[in-house]
Image (cartoon, rainbow, N blue to C red):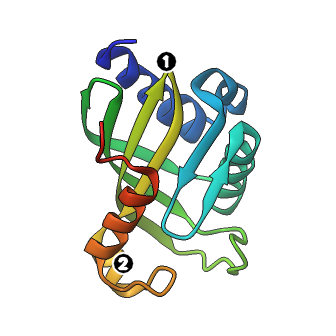
Amino acid sequence: MSAEENEVNVRRLNDEVWNRGNLALVDELVTPDYVFHGPETEIKGPEGLKQYIAAMRTAFPDLHMTIEGMVAEGDMVAARYTARGTFEGEFMGTAPTGKQMTLPNAAFARFKGGKQPVILCILTYQYVKLKPIRGIDKAGEVVLSLYAREKLLTP
């Protein structure tokens, strides 16, 4: 698949799945061995992704992810997002606050056969400094440790 086709995959996952809740598309867009590496969670497989998105959309019923910019090269796509929504339902053991959240983040997806087998999501430096992630309180260490774990910096 071309870099442009990989970008289309990322846009479809964002627009049709995250924003519209069309979870049926997940199987078409990610591989069976898909892994999402986030700062506070690791999601495995299409079913795990569907459950996570459903939980997010329940906690933030007006959730909207805006792609602010995207770059694709070879089998990699990097995208900068802003997630917005109102925290109206429990999420990961946290009671709802009724407050609006705005969370800038970045995601790096690698592709295999036109589908995403792995994605690395990195929250903004401000978020990392406010909420230490798994005992790591420096954004650079978080990024490097996640990159090293998935070997996203190697060809």
Amino acid type, residue under disc 2 in the picture: Val
Please tell me which residue lies in front, 79 or 3: 3
> If you read the primary sequence from the N terminus, does the residue marked by circle 2 or circle 1 appear first?
1
Q: Which mark is residue 128?
A: 2
Q: Going by the image, does 48 lie left or right of 130?
A: right
Please tell me which residue lies in front, 84 or 72: 72
Helix, strand or loop at disc 1?
A: loop
* Quadrant of the image containing the C terminus: top left
Helix, strand or loop at disc 2?
A: helix
Residue at the image position 65 percent from the left and 48 percent from the top? 53
Please tell me which residue lies in front, 127 or 147: 147
In this view, 145 is above or below 78: below
Q: Percent position (x, y) of residue 74? A: 28, 23
Q: Going by the image, does 11 lie left or right of 106?
A: right
Q: Percent position (x, y) of residue 150? A: 45, 51
Q: Between marks 2 and 1, how big is the CA–CA gap?
A: 32 Å
Instruction: Determine which quarter of the picture holds residue 18.
Output: top right
Q: Residues within 10 Å of mark 2 (few under 14, many from 20)?
A: some
Q: Which residue is mark 1?
A: 114
In this view, 111 is above or below 67: above
| Tags 2 and 1 touching, CB below 8 Å | no
In this view, 10 is above or below 54: above
Amino acid type, residue under disc 1 in the picture: Gly
Instruction: Determine which quarter of the picture holds residue 50.
Output: top right
Q: Residues within 10 Å of mark 1 (few under 14, many from 20)?
A: some
* Quadrant of the image containing the N terminus: top left
Q: Percent position (x, y) of residue 68? A: 26, 43
